[in-house]
Image (cartoon, helix red, strand yellow):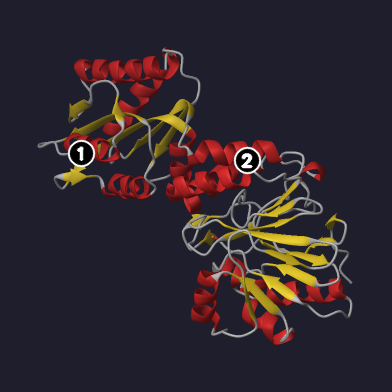
Amino acid sequence: MYKLKEIAKDVFYVGVNDRQKQLFENLWPLPYGVSYNAYLIMDEKTVLMDTVDACFADIFLKKISDALDGRTLDYLVVNHMEPDHAGSIRLLRQQYPEVQIVGNSKTFGMLEGFHGITEGLHEVKEGDTLSIGRRQLQFYMAPMVHWPEVMVTYETTDKILFSADAFGTFGTLDGGILDDEMNIEPYWEEMMRYYSNIVGKYGSPVQRALQKLAALEIETICSLHGPVWRTHKEKTIALYDRLSRYEGEDGVVIIYGSMYGNTEQMAEVIASSLAANGVKNIVMHNVSKSHASYIIKDVFKYKGVIIGSPTYSNQLYPEVESILSKIQIREVKNRLFGYFGSFTWAGAAVKRLTAFGEEMKWEVVGVPAEQKQSMKPDNYDACWALGEAMAERIINK
Ligand code: FEO
């Protein structure tokens, strides 16, 4: 029944789209959904590359059965054990009891823990090869991209890299599968959000994996989320490379909390000053309105970060404190940092933001602006000067 997309000769896309889930990992909004990709190779042996979220097992198993057309499934390669990909393994095993599951020793520890599967396993180590007929599969470990058991699989005939989460993005596949057969422009922003939200903490492991993969000649990248990259693979690799080096674009994200608009007014003056002094990319996030997912994305995207908060119960405004912790978890490096705060009777926000900048080892730009109650001319001037100092640093490097 299914006319499955053949992404290379005898290599079929058998993934699914999730247009139902509101929050990925129950944390990150999915306004454009997400795809769980899986691929089936038909050679002398039949090989499935990963499974999908268990919610979609029914349609997934039907696609596989249609593609196999009466043949059995010989191998399942498990590149990643997170349940958005490994959730259907147990059901797959029930349907194909003879299938050999290919993974590394860490994969198999998780396979037992999540699914109670301990038999029919084929263990591979770094650089091992599995012959499946005309084609060879080679395995490379990519620990912490994004879990410790992650590995990638390289198919040597058509030079296809099955890259696990790497080079993935949020966003469903709305008909097209291959990047050159669809409009891929909407995916770049979602790729940054996916990377920063999900993989962002693991910049060093991503760099190590990229260096390892640089030795391979790659024609096609089959990630577990989003389009199959062929024509735009260099741009995709470059984006992952830049993000994992924490290299920001020229621009500033202003993140602030405000109860009655006084701190927000400071943010507005800083933004006006940035613009007046030549910064074009300025993004403002009111923490009570913008979801943390988008704020984190912009912290990864831009090299300038300016954070402001009112003092609240002698601490930071709670939603500002919350976003600081999410940035800290991801160990974002090399940002230019400006900050400001307000208070009514005793200031604590600027002090806490000073400590945050020190913990992050970020370069402090300008003099922190601090305001008591409403904005006075000297507060306005301090905010303007902060914007000016950041603009100078962004534009003149
Ligand atoms: Fe898409 Fe780390 O799972």
Nearer-the-camera pick, 265 or 47: 47
Say what amino acid the circle numbered 2 marks.
Ile
**Front tag of 1 and 2:** 2
- Say which label, 1 or 2, has the lower sequence index: 2
How many other residues sit within 10 Å of disc 1, few (<14), some (14-19) or many (≥20)?
few
Q: Position of residue 347 (x, y in %)?
A: 13, 36
How many other residues sit within 10 Å of disc 2, few (<14), some (14-19) or many (≥20)?
some
Q: Position of residue 78 (x, y in %)?
A: 63, 68
State yes or no: discs 1 and 2 in contact (Cβ < 8 Å): no
Residue at label 1? 355
Q: Position of residue 293 (x, y in %)?
A: 47, 48
Which label sits on residue 237? 2
Give left or right: position of 378 versus 183. left
Instruction: Say how many tags the image has.
Output: 2
User: In percent of the image, x 45 and y 37: which residue is there?
Assistant: 246
Give left or right: position of 248 versus 165. left
User: In percent of the image, x 68 and y 75: which residue is there?
Assistant: 57
Above or below, 101 relative to 50: below
Say what amino acid the circle numbered 1 marks.
Ala
How far, Cα to Cα, is label 1 from label 2?
Answer: 35 Å
- Mark 2 CB within 8 Å of ligand 1: no
